[in-house]
Amino acid sequence: MSSGPKKTGDEGSVLGSMTSILAELRGILDSNLAPSAMITTLLEVDDTAHKVIKSFGQGREMILGLKESMTGAVDAIKLLGGTWVDIETIQMNVSKTLNRNLVLSKDSYEGLYATSKVAGVEADSMVSSFKDAGFSAYDAASKMGEVVNIARELGVNVKSVSSNVLYNMDAINKYNFEGGVQGLAKMAAQASMLRIDMRDTLAFTEKVYNPEGAIETAAALQRLGVAQSDLLDPLRLMDLSQNDPTELQNQIVQMTQQFVKLNDAGNFEIMKGSKRQFREIADAMKIPYETLTKMALGSAELDDKMKRIRFPNLNLSEEQRTMIANMAEMKDGTYKIQVGGESKSISQLSKEDVELLKKVGEPKTMEELARDQLSTLESIDANTLYFKGKLPYTVAGSKVGQTTLDMGRNITRGAAKSVPKELSIDELRKSLNSTTSEVTNIVKGMGDNTISVTEGIKKLSEVLTNGGTFIETTWKKWSENLLKGLDSEGINVTNLKKTYENMIDGKTVPVNNPRPVYNTTQNPSINITPKETNTNNQTSSTGSNNSTVDVNLNHTVTINAPAGVDTQQLVLALKNEEIKQSILKSVKDGVTNSGRLTSTSNPQQSMNSLRNSFGLVT
């Protein structure tokens, strides 16, 4: 059977794409308009907010402000590839690491998230380190942004510099860095560039901080033949250690270059005749020999690159020259760099090449960098995610959303507060135990003939009646208390109160399917065989519907009960006066079809009505 014309490959591809796009749009609409999505988001935001205030050890007074702040950051975080979980993690971890009940502003979530992604450090670690150095938690992202841009400007690995800065942030309060964090960042960038541990040079800074150490070190270096003048003057050493550790590290780096040479193979090495002298210098400075050799070889290579680069007349800054040099590496006897997909010698860079490389190191915001670093698919996902759930998150952080959730809390709280004492577990257990004991004693008495069957049924009826009275009284009390409980929680119960009063007074009676339907597979079947007996006072007329007919009906009731059911007990139960009255009322309603038929109706019609009312079979 043909299902229609076949689609060509192109047509199928287009239809598939259209279907995918429509499905995506449907998903976006559902995420904003579907009630299930709204409820899910409301509860997700509420759950997170309560986790935060629980960690604070606080009540719900600040719950709305917390939700407004966190949901206000959703759009920005989504565009950076993040989710609600990232916002929750930042808030929880930052407040925990600060040991303070700090609710972050909505703008700070974006900055901390973007910076943590670019710098490769956790938001709470970043905030903690800068806070320890005396900076505001809200300045942590911007200060780390300065560190990132300095590393990018010099062509050094951002994550290495960032971790170096955070690890040594305590140095900010020990020494005076030029530019504060920027000076520390430059020192960390140079250490990363030379692949050395910044702690080693900071230890030397501490050694020459005092006059005794500065004098001792300067004398030792002079005796060992060091030519770097700034390291031979004790006063200059003290000044650099106290006010410019970055420059002090730079002076050490320059000093090490005098022990390096370029060998015949084109590689740098420590001069053979200087290795013992270099060891003694390392011992006098209390800097590991391995650290000094890395400094010597790395700085010599960088210096050689800078000399060989023939930059066009573009007025490049020292930082831009250093960046280009750091991006180049020796290959086939010359320093080469990748530009526009091609490997070029740094001595042959064109003006256009240099302009392109300059853009690489231009400062950017952390948000711009975070977005730039998303892959194409990640960017598409982020932009799609941006549209999803906007309305639910908007409602979740609004007074409307909070009011909705509060209403649910207050209604259930009011209902719980209104439960009478009689419905407590203890009271219900006591009532159940008492009733069970009474029933047990009655049944036992009927079994050992100390209580007659008639008396036993009567007592059981009384017990059940008392139970019904207890339930009715308790229900009424609970209903009254419920209204008071809801009122105390600020719930408008005017209409609700009226409904409850009608129910309590019996004015409102459910009428859904009032006629009972018996399932013969589950209930005993009742077969009624009519036996009509004409008496002397019976007047019969078949010719007129207006005649009066008196009928005495004698019925034989046969009860076919399932196995295990004592039919004698059912017979005794049917003799109970209340049950009798209930049966008589049901018969009367059946005969008159609940009042719709008169008492003078045709007897057969009345009997049919009775049978139909109760689903009885003859």
Image (spheres, grey):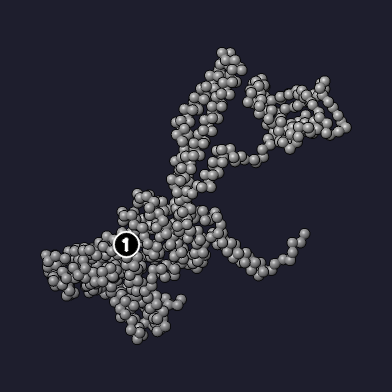
Quarter of the image for residue 515 reads top right
User: Who is closer to the viewer here, 256 or 492?
Assistant: 492
Q: Position of residue 173 (x, y in %)?
A: 22, 63
Q: Position of residue 413 (x, y in %)?
A: 45, 44
User: Who is closer to the viewer here, 97 or 102?
Assistant: 102
Q: Position of residue 591 (x, y in %)?
A: 74, 32
How many tags in the picture?
1
State whether residue 474 is above or below residue 222: above
Please give left or right for residue 583 compared with residue 270 in the image. right
User: Who is closer to the viewer here, 179 or 215?
Assistant: 179
State whether residue 362 is above or below residue 124: below
User: Who is closer to the viewer here, 576 or 504?
Assistant: 504
The N terminus appears in which quarter of the rendering? Answer: bottom right
Q: Amino acid at mark 1?
A: Ala
Please give left or right for residue 57 compared with residue 14 in the image. left
Quarter of the image for residue 580 reads top right
The C terminus appears in which quarter of the rendering? Answer: top right
Q: Position of residue 136 (x, y in %)?
A: 30, 63
Tell me what residue is drawn at x 37 percent, y 75 percent.
Answer: 362
Please give left or right for residue 528 compared with residue 92 in the image. right
Residue 81 visible, this angle: no
Tell me what residue is drawn at x 60 percent, y 20 percent.
Answer: 457
Tell me what residue is drawn at x 29 percent, y 61 percent.
Answer: 131
Looking at this view, name the residue that lies furthest to the bottom: 313
Give the residue number, with chain letter if any, for mark 1. Answer: 137
Please give left or right for residue 331 compared with residue 24 in the image. left
Q: Circle 1 — which element?
A: helix
Quarter of the image for residue 97 reads bottom left
Tell me what residue is drawn at x 49 percent, y 24 percent.
Answer: 434
Q: Residues within 10 Å of mark 1 (few under 14, many from 20)?
A: many
